[in-house]
Amino acid sequence: MAAERADAAPLRPIGLLGGTFDPIHLGHLRLAEEARETLALECVRLIPAGRPPHRGEPGSTADDRLAMAHLATAGNPGLEIDDGEVRARQKSYTVPTLERLRAELGPRRPLVLILGADAFEGLPGWHRWQELFALTHIAIANRPGYAPHARRWPATLSPELAALCQDRHTSDPADLRAAPAGRVIPFDMTPLAISASLIRDLIGHGHSARYLLPDSVLDYIGAHGLYR
Ligand code: ATP
């Protein structure tokens, strides 16, 4: 009986944050940290893409982006790095990554895919995107310059995506513990108008990017001559 009860105890959700992280910056780190707290996640796994399918070649190698992600999260036990997509070397698609994590973490563990509002709106362009909902919950954070999703879906959202999200919507993080996958939860984070492209642009033009990303990452960029 005791074993049965232990088996039935709710598992804390694990957050997943994929990205190119070219380079990782304070927008990514606050997104992960605020999602972890607001949604009561056990931890957030950051998953650098090896070869991102939706954009040109990144400005730095997958190994550099992985190294910078490790530097940025050092000392925070709530943030982990998953190097599965970097090691795979083929194009990084989220559904196969989620299938791998589902196999690793088991069918009962709630997973929460964390997306900025821009990434969420781009979802209908993703490989096998309709299959996401069977594998994970989705949490959507506001991002400056993109329509907020806090109260209702913006008009800019694809009608197919809006329809799929309609019955899945919740604003209660407890719902994420009640099932392993399938809910959609918008949440507010401190708005930070920081992007990796802004940082690459600043460095490329010889300007300072200090205080937009951790010093350890900026030092790495300088030492390896990235984005010049
Ligand atoms: P780029 O400028 O090169 O397109 P990016 O800064 O958008 O890069 P990505 O690695 O593409 O960074 O983003 C990974 C995830 O982090 C995406 O879900 C994105 O929406 C989210 N994200 C990135 N920056 C922010 C930010 N400042 N606020 C909220 N979400 C963010």
Image: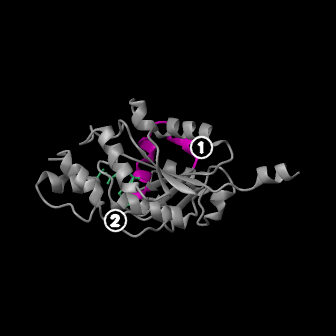
SS for tag 1?
helix
N-term mark: 1 or 2: 1
Is disc 2 surrounded by few (<14), some (14 to 19) or many (20+) residues within 10 Å? some
Is 133 covered by the magenta stretch?
yes
In x, y percent, where is residue 31? 43, 61
Q: Is residue 32 above or below residue 105?
A: below
Image quadrant assignment for residue 165:
bottom right
Is 189 covered by the magenta stretch?
no
x 19%, y 48%: residue: 223
Seen from the viewer's position, the closer of residues 142 and 26 is: 26
User: Do we see residue 68 in this rendering?
Assistant: yes
Seen from the viewer's position, the closer of residues 197 and 124 is: 197
Span shown in magenta: 116-136
Q: Residue tagged by mark 1?
A: 135
Taken as a whole, is the magenta stretch helix, strand or loop?
helix
Cβ of mark 1 under 8 Å from ligand 1: the answer is no
Q: Residue tagged by mark 2?
A: 144
Seen from the viewer's position, the closer of residues 27 and 68 is: 68
Cβ of mark 2 under 8 Å from ligand 1: the answer is yes
Give amino acid for label 1.
Leu
In the image, taking residue 67 as reference, residue 187 lies left or right, namely: right
Q: Is residue 200 above or below residue 103?
A: below
